[in-house]
Every structure is written in structure tokens, then in C-alpha cells.
Amino acid sequence: MTAATGGDRGHSDHWGVITRNTIGSPVAALRNGPYGSFGVQGPSARPPYGRGSLGIEVADDSTSLTPPSEKVDFGNEVDFFGDPVLGLNQVGFHVFQTNENISYGGPRNLPGIKFEIDPNLTAAPATNYSTMVWMPGPSPVTNRWSPYLDATTTGDWFLTGNAGNVTGCNQTTMCTFQQLKTALNDGGEQPIIYTAAVSKGRDHMWIGAVDGLRINNTVYDFEAHGVKTRRAN
């Protein structure tokens, strides 16, 4: 797994919109801010790292498909390829959530984190693709930057496709992070990562931002000029 060795490590050039996983005309763009909302001061009024973030905008009714909602994955298809899924120990991010987003889809209307993986399940040897999805719980604050949302201890995880059915960690019966790792560790070849991404859709309209994506010992700091890698504290 990509890991920091000390201080800021520079930039990763391999982050961007994953085109094959994007539907409609959503926005996932590196930007400055957001700052605020108005009247908000102190650390929660600015991005947790640097001056920028990953701005995300998705619509719920803008395509001719069923459902008509949009979807976007902003991720990395290079740096994590072949890394062990069971080597994931720290995952999470900070989010800028608004009351408007809650009105569109409820308190859990938020982006998530996705890992495309080869589950390598003994019980399903022909299944070589699934997406491992984290759905956060509600942000503890709105109209400002959240504290770190820890995907290893909060929210719910599931696997798409046959891997979800075999393990029981699917969209109907979601799992904790540790339950999911235990289900994937079924005695066969170890599961491996294909890609990692911040994702939103296809469900409710959402307009906000994410910063400080953590994967193990590395924090990915989304800045207007690129993705900066930092060592996690």
C-alpha cells in the first residue's frame, strides 16, 4: 500500500475522474476552498489541508437512463493496483456537508469511498471483480468542514455483485469494516485492489467537497493545482 515516509511527499499525477465509472455530466474538480459558510470561523471554516479540496456536484434527475441520476468517481487507477485489500487499516476523509444536501437526501446523503477489487474468494473462484464501498454515517456538523470521518469505525461497507451475495456484505445486509475484511479472508488467495476513489451517486443531488482522503499512512490533500501526498499523523 502506498505509504508516506515523512513529511509531505510531493504530488501524485494519477488522480482524476474515472471516465468508465462516470454517468451524466457531474463535476469532480480540484478547487480552492470552500471557506465558510458565512459566519463560520476557525479551523472548520477552511479545508483541513492546504487551501483546496475536491469539489463534487451530482444531479438526481439529469439523464435519460433509469434511474436518471448522475454518478462520478474521482480516483486513482495506477498507484494502488495489486495492493492487498487486507492491508487496509486506515481509511477515511473530511467532508463539507450542507443542510441543503440533507434536504435532498437525508443526513447520510454524502460521498463515499470505493475500492475496485479482485475479491479472490474461495467460495466464488470465478468472481474476479467487485467494488468495495463505504457509505459514511451522518456528518456531525453542517455548513462547515467536518472532523475526520473514520471509515474503519463508522458507516457501513458492502461489496457489489456476486461477492456481496457470497460474503453477505451487500447493499441489503451491510457490514462493518472488520466484518468485511473477515469475510474476504476466507482462506484462499488474498484479495487485491484495482483502484481507489471518492465517489457519489447514483442517488440524490449533492453539492459539496471532500479533502484529506486517508489510505493507511498517506493523506491525499486535494489542492487546486493537484493532489498532494502527506504523511498521516
Image: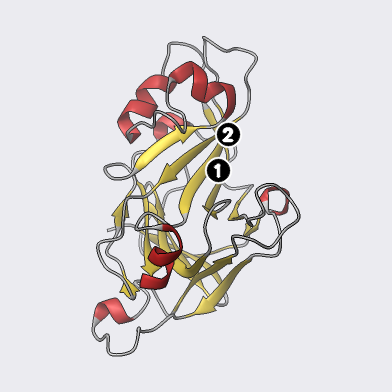
Furthest-right residue in this view = 64
Which is nearer the eye, 105 or 51? 105
Helix, strand or loop for disc 1 = loop
| SS at mark 2 in the image | loop
Asked whether the viewer can see residue 129, the reply is: yes
Q: Position of residue 192 (x, y in %)?
A: 54, 30
Q: Please say if 82 is above or below 90.
A: above
**Residue pictured at 35% horizontal, 80% vertical:** 46
- Residue 80's tag is 1
Q: Nearer the viewer, residue 113 or 166?
A: 166
Residue contact between numbered discs 1 and 2, judged by CB atoms under 8 Å: yes
**Mark 2, residue position:** 82
Amino acid type of disc 1? Answer: Phe
Q: Residues within 10 Å of mark 1 (few under 14, many from 20)?
A: some
Rounded to the nearest whole Å, what is the CA distance between mark 1 and mark 2?
6 Å
Q: Residue at x 47, y 49 (%)?
A: 113
Residue name at image x 48 percent, y 40 percent:
133
- The residue under the point 52% across, 41% down is 115
Which x, y percent locates residue 50?
40, 77
Badge 2 crowding class, 10 Å Cα cut-off, few under 14, some 14 to 19, many 20 or more, is: some
* Along the viewing direction, whichever of 58 and 231 lies nearer the viewer: 58
Q: Position of residue 221 (x, y in %)?
A: 45, 66
Q: Position of residue 25 (x, y in %)?
A: 70, 65
Looking at the rendering, in which quadrant would you find the C terminus? bottom left
User: Which quadrant of the figure has residue 173?
Assistant: top left
